[in-house]
Amino acid sequence: MRGPLVVLILAAAGGMAQCSGAGRSTSLATTEPSASGAVGDPLTLVYDRDSFAHRGKLLARIRSSPFAYYRYLGGPFNRLVCERYRLKIDAMPTVSLHGDAHLEQYAVADDGFGVVDFDDATLGPPVLDWLRFATSVWLATANERGAAQAIKRFVEGYRLGLRDPEATLRAREPGAATRIRQGFNTTPGEWLDQVSALIEPLDESSAARLNLARDSYLTEIRPKNPELPSWFFELKRSGALRLGVGSAHQTKFLVRVEGRTRDPADDVILEKKQMKHELVGPCARGDVSDPVRVIAAQARFSRSAQRLLGYAHVAGETFYVHAWRVHYTEIRVEDVRDATELGELAYDFGLQLGRGHPLLPHDSEQGKAERRSIDVLINDFEDELEAVSSELAVRVRRSYEQFRTASDPQKESR
């Protein structure tokens, strides 16, 4: 069954339209994995048993594959890229970054397909997104030739999206996405019930916090959608969501509301997700405290508008809110059957990054100049992109093996 339980991969903010389904400093238990104190490669995370004492599922997920480890490695990876290019990066153009571009940030739902999860969206040099995605391609397959071809397809798509933003809207759906959609075997109502089963009860303090977030969100979103019926946001179920890999340390709430009619089959799932404050490393150029950054990025990269995107301020914290698309399913690396499918996904990912990176209107003189500068950079960087991402993937695999050995439960029990 390919229903919502696939969001165990990542509780993501969507970008297909934007669809969605399902932090990291010095301690793994805070908001971001750390390489501080690692011997040798900064991509090797120090295993702290206490940090994972109550996160057994998360640890098992990270240990399951080099790709899963890489997903948890976002902060250290991007800091390494910033350091590697520190002498060149100031001369690179500023773009609207996805911030965590990797192969499993691609999803399919009943009514869309495309790039998802804009938690880390900010402004910065495009090399961060390029290397993050290309490295994920090497980690997704043992077929080196297929990986190299997929990176070429990514660059091909990126160039087209950069030069012709409308090409993204005309794009053909990748074969892997079509196959997953054809495998949906639940009704919308059954899907809603499965998602609702992910909602966990809250203590009194957390419930009050959620209600405040909901009130703040409704104050902002209702005036933007005056045609919605008065009962649309009536609460049917709410609670905590404890899923994710890169987002595992963020506070997340899940809410089921009434929707357009009283029919339970058209209820709407809203996720309220704590904003990250540590993003893509020291070469980021955006305001990480601005809640609009996630919403703006989704609008910039999306294939269609999202009417329920909003944010809420609660007790000094900011949450962004988005709706989950029916049958939202993230593509996993195991879903990709061959090099052709990998290339199709890479091409479409490139299309969407190429469309979403530029900050200025496509038809303005400034916008044309901006796109030319990005185009020149990707042309100059293409060969290096393949070589450096391959090297980084080797380092990630080696670091993964070291972390896996250090965190072996059997070793600890002896």
Image (tube, rainbow, N blue to C red):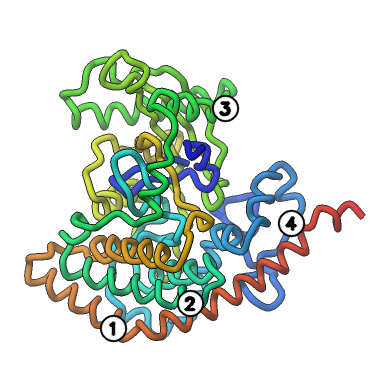
Circle 1 sits on which residue? 379
Q: Which residue is drawn at 34% across and 67% down?
A: 124
Quick one: label 4 or label 2, which is nearer the N terminus? 4
Res. 188 image quadrant: top left
Q: In this view, does 5 lie above or below 9?
A: above
Q: Mark 3 and mark 2: span between their CA atoms? A: 39 Å
Closer to the N terminus: mark 3 or mark 1? 3
Residue 251: % across, % down: 52, 39
Q: Position of residue 357 (x, y in %)?
A: 27, 64
Q: Which of 2 and 198 is in front in this view?
A: 2
Q: In this view, does 367 lie to the left or right of 115?
A: left
* Cα gap from disc 3 to disc 4, whole angstroms: 27 Å
Q: What residue type is labelled 1?
A: Asn
Residue tagged by mark 2? 389
Cα–Cα span, label 4 and label 1: 42 Å
Q: Distance between the residues labelled 3 and 1?
A: 49 Å
| Residue at the right extreme of this rendering | 414
Residue at numbered disc 4? 48
Q: Mark 3 or mark 1, which is nearer to you? A: 1
Residue 58: image location, x then y, percent:
64, 47
What SS does tag 1 mark? helix
Q: Name the front one of labels 3 and 4.
A: 3
Secondary structure category for the residue under label 3: loop
Secondary-structure class at tag 4:
loop
Q: Do the residues labelled 3 and 4 touch (CB within 8 Å)?
A: no
Pointer 3 residue: 200
